[in-house]
Amino acid sequence: MRNILKITAVLLLISIIHISIPLRVYGYDKGRVPEYVKIGLKYGESATPMISISGKNGLALGSYINSVFNPIISFLSSEEIHVRKDSYFMGLNGSFIEYQYNEQMDNGNQTIQGPIHIQIGPQFSSQEEAQAFMSSLTTMPTKPYLSFEDGWKVWTGMFTSTISAQSAIEALRLTFPEHEVNIIPQNNRRIQVLSKTGDVLCMVNLGETDYYFKSNGSNMVKVDGKNFRGDIGIKRYTGSDLTIINRISLEEYLYGVVPKEMSGTWPLEAQKAQAVAARNYAIEKLGSHNQYGFDLCATTHCQVYGGFDSEHERSRGAVDETRGKFLTYNGELVTPFYHSNSGGHTENSENIWSSPIGYLKGVSDPFSIGAPNDTWSYVMTKDQIQEVLNSKQLSVGDLNSIQVTSYSDFGRVLKMEVSGSSDKKILEKEKVRSIFGYNNIKSTWFTVNTDASATVISGDASGPKQISSGNLFIAAADGTRQLDGSLEQIVVFNGIELKNISFNAKQYVFTGKGWGHGLGMSQWGAKKMAEEGYTYDQILTYYYTGTQIE
């Protein structure tokens, strides 16, 4: 009986010990992590009427159906080809520029190519049939080419108007009376593919479907002289230029991000921290550009992405060694905001934006001290400040003073008061930087002084403090009163002589610490930590409170 009790006690103890061991919980949704991402290289205002593209072993043009590439036509030459929208172009010095034909209408210019085409013969069920038919047209006045538009066809010409195409049709009907000949009008979804010398290789219209160029036998495509891994997609919106998209695996995308956000020569552990942060950030930002048909852009709006040409061997190693690693907080993926230099202390999210975020809490950061931009200053004249305020519809009239009225516990500006002859404006938190420039006011951790000479010693200050006339009180025969903020100078007696004290500031000096919003990881701090032997996970969990690597 005693042995049974002993065995029961041991089993109970083992059970208690087992229960007390913390289990590692993977709480984030792995389904959110895609194998491939679409990166917008050109879109919106940067969309382009034409690109040059090439592959080492030529290119295949097609589309993706359920993540499977469906080739339509191949171009076997390694020479670059031109891809452009179906529009008007003028040859110029061996290249092409878009031509505003409806405005200029220079019918006599023989270098202008237009979006009006002629179809000869019927529609074919395969490229081979269309190719054979095209080869039979031996007496064509202009060179024929293939077109894929709801099937394979043979077209000719790049006419600038229906009238000029009609003249060509009459000649074709005389030459090929047995074939039907029709005019093909411009289409806002169609693209033109031309050789480097300008010969038409084909026309393609996939309607709402995106076009993709895939390198034959390799994973590298060159676009306008820059190399990119993966495939290059082209989307045509009605009446727009070409939106250019790089379809690439998530990890290869990071190859082109990490060295653009952090120098590829920096310590490996710092770059591994950057790689995890960039991976997290990419997933959290997915869908930011759905309206343009891609996931992320290649600029600071998402993350700077430079393609293959920006890659660095050490950065690739950082991505590979952290493959599949994410930073989580309470089982959820975090958005790991980062910045260049904290200046010595990071900040709470609510003191930069509006809402508190559990993992974005201010931490002491001695690792950033001594690095570039740990301190800075920026000088603006009164006239420059007034010009900026007026351009932002924040006019205060003749500027009298700028004063910080509220700081966070860690020293960053929460409210700054700008006073003038006609109005007063309160700029809060990051609004100061957005108004005066993120590269000028490098952080919100700053003080403001002027070239005005008035200083006072008050009971709440350890030393002389510069003030404006609006903060000055004097004792007069009729009592104590506050001076008018527009006062430019006063005369005081210092016990020896009368002196003029100026309040008319001509220059404002912003003196601050750090560069960036101050949230999360300081990149220069991460570099220093890595140099001192910290690992990437230690770096990340130091800057992001309560997080873990999964």
Image (spheres, grey):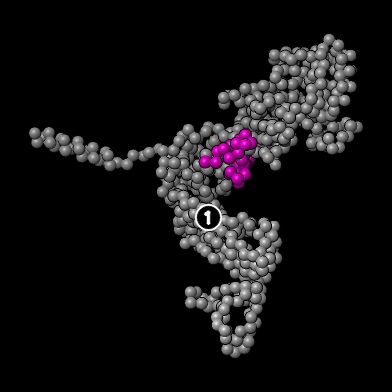
- Give percent across and percent down for residue 516: 56, 54
Q: In the drawing, does residue 81 fall left or right of residue 3?
A: right
- Look at the image and tell me in which quarter the C terminus lies: top left
- The answer to whether residue 81 shows anywhere in this view is no
- Look at the image and tell me in which quarter the N terminus lies: top left
The image shows residue 9, relative to residue 510, as above or below, that is above
Which residue is most to the bottom?
496
Residue depicted at 62% across the width and 22% down the height: 70
- Is 306 magenta? The answer is yes
Q: In the drawing, does residue 131 fall left or right of residue 141?
A: left
- Give percent across and percent down for residue 455: 58, 77
- Tally of numbered discs: 1
Residue 206 appears in which quarter of the rendering?
A: top right
Residue depicted at 86% across the width and 17% down the height: 172
Toward the viewer: 66 or 290? 290
Q: Which residue is mark 1?
A: 352
Q: Main secondary structure of the magenta part?
A: loop
Residue 258 appears in which quarter of the rendering?
A: top right
Task: Inspect the image, locate mark 1, and give the three-letter code of the amino acid beneath it.
Answer: Ile
Magenta range is 284-309
Q: In the drawing, does residue 165 fall left or right of residue 148?
A: right
- Give percent across and percent down for residue 407: 51, 63
- Give percent across and percent down for residue 289: 60, 38
The image shows residue 129, relative to residue 317, as above or below, that is above
